[in-house]
Amino acid sequence: MVEIKEVTNLTPEERKRKNELLSKPIKAINPLSTKTVSDLLHAYSDMSVQARNMGKCLEVYENMLTDARRPVIFLGLAGPLIAGGLREVIRSMVDLGLVDVIVSTGAIMYQDVYQARGYNHYMGTPNSNDAELRDLYIDRIYDTYVDEEKFIETDTWIGDFASSLEPRGYSSREFMQLLGKQLNDEKSIVATAAKKGVPIFIPAINDSSIGIGLTSYYRWAKLNEKPRMYIDSIRDNYELTQIVVKYRHTAAIYVAGGVPKNFINDSVVMGYVFNVDTGGHLYAFQLTTDSPHWGGLSGSTLEEATSWGKISKKATRATAYVDPMVSLPLIVTSVIQDGLYKNRNRLEMLWKDDELLSIKEAGQP
């Protein structure tokens, strides 16, 4: 019998450390025992690469929703989410109290309004004849089509609504709340948020078809020498930061990146304006396809945000590099299947103009 000799000379301490590092074997997923989306994502936690990261993101979300401190959850939204089919996923997050504050690109909320007015996004192809689409007034978002004529009608409707408002400054939050009350569509994110008291901030509202509609209104007011309403973007900063400093315990979900991600994080930095240091978000997870090594904020890591004080040094955090069209529905469906919304009281925010008079859990004095 051949004698097998030890080929390494590990010290007892090294041997102990090696055993620690090799203590958790990868577990192969068993499709026969996976009955629900929740089962699937929890099984992901014992796998590798982005499957494990998806499992970690779910764990972070579960911690957000069950923390006794009841952190206010900010949801940052960027990318073609409505065109991609996530309208009902995001609306369910609002409706069930899985999110407390939304910061979004203007395009996402505009496309929700577009659909609330009875129009649709249509299945197309990235291999379209785009010159032909231009002639037919069909706009393409990768493999999705929209009707530009209906976009123009929606732009005009937004401009007409703006003309009905008192001529003064509005934050995007106040404007979107008022706009949401005009929508008669129970599947609308904007309408549901207005009904449930979930504020929607659009810090780059000019850079969207909402901004185009408001530009149309601006020209009308100028030609007719009418006083006008306008969006006060710095008031957005002031209002959002009040939520952070008056509630203190915060968490963040970043779907893609862009301005919404940075705006949520800047609200923590701006706490010094109120002489408050909240310590950063307690929890954070990001679903993105952007890479960090280009130095852009969309791909920047949550660890990088810690250096700015935006994310707490002790925060529970995770990032999954998975298309949000795939990842967000899985994670949201999982927490809904597990009933994590059932014991979570809504936040009630009382605003007077740009002042947040109070923020508290529903039912508290």
Image: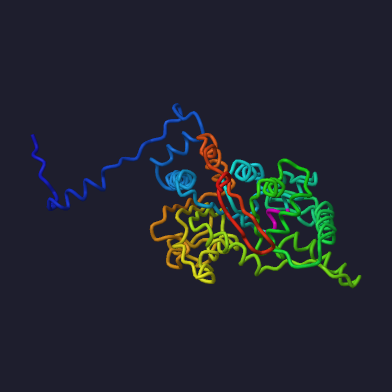
For this rendering, which residue is in front, 331 or 349?
A: 349
Q: In this view, does 248 lie to the left or right of 215?
A: left
**Residue 9 on the magenta segment:** no
Confirm whether the magenta stretch covers residue 109: yes
Q: Does 228 sit above or below residue 289?
A: below
**Is residue 132 visible in the rendered structure shown here?**
no
112 horizontally vs 305: left or right: right
Q: Can you say which quadrant of the picture contains the N terminus?
A: top left
Residue 157 screen position, x and y as percent: 83, 55
Q: What stretch is highlighted in magenta?
A: 106-110
Q: Where is residue 191 in the image (x, y as percent from the top left)?
A: 72, 47
Give percent across and percent down for residue 88: 65, 42
Main SS category, magenta section: helix
Measuring 66% from the left and 46% from the top, which residue is drawn there?
196
Q: Position of residue 232 (x, y in %)?
A: 70, 68
Q: Which residue is drawn at 42% across and 67% down?
A: 307
Q: Which residue lies furthest to the right in this view?
A: 224
Instruction: Name the residue at the front extreme.
Output: 365
In the depicted structure, whether residue 93 falls above or below residue 349: above
Q: Is residue 156 visible?
A: yes
Q: Nearer the viewer, residue 155 or 163?
A: 163
Q: In the shown orientation, is residue 22 left or right of residue 244? A: left
Closer to us: 147 or 247? 247
- Is 141 located above or below residue 354 in the figure? above
In the image, taking residue 330 as reference, residue 189 lies left or right, namely: right
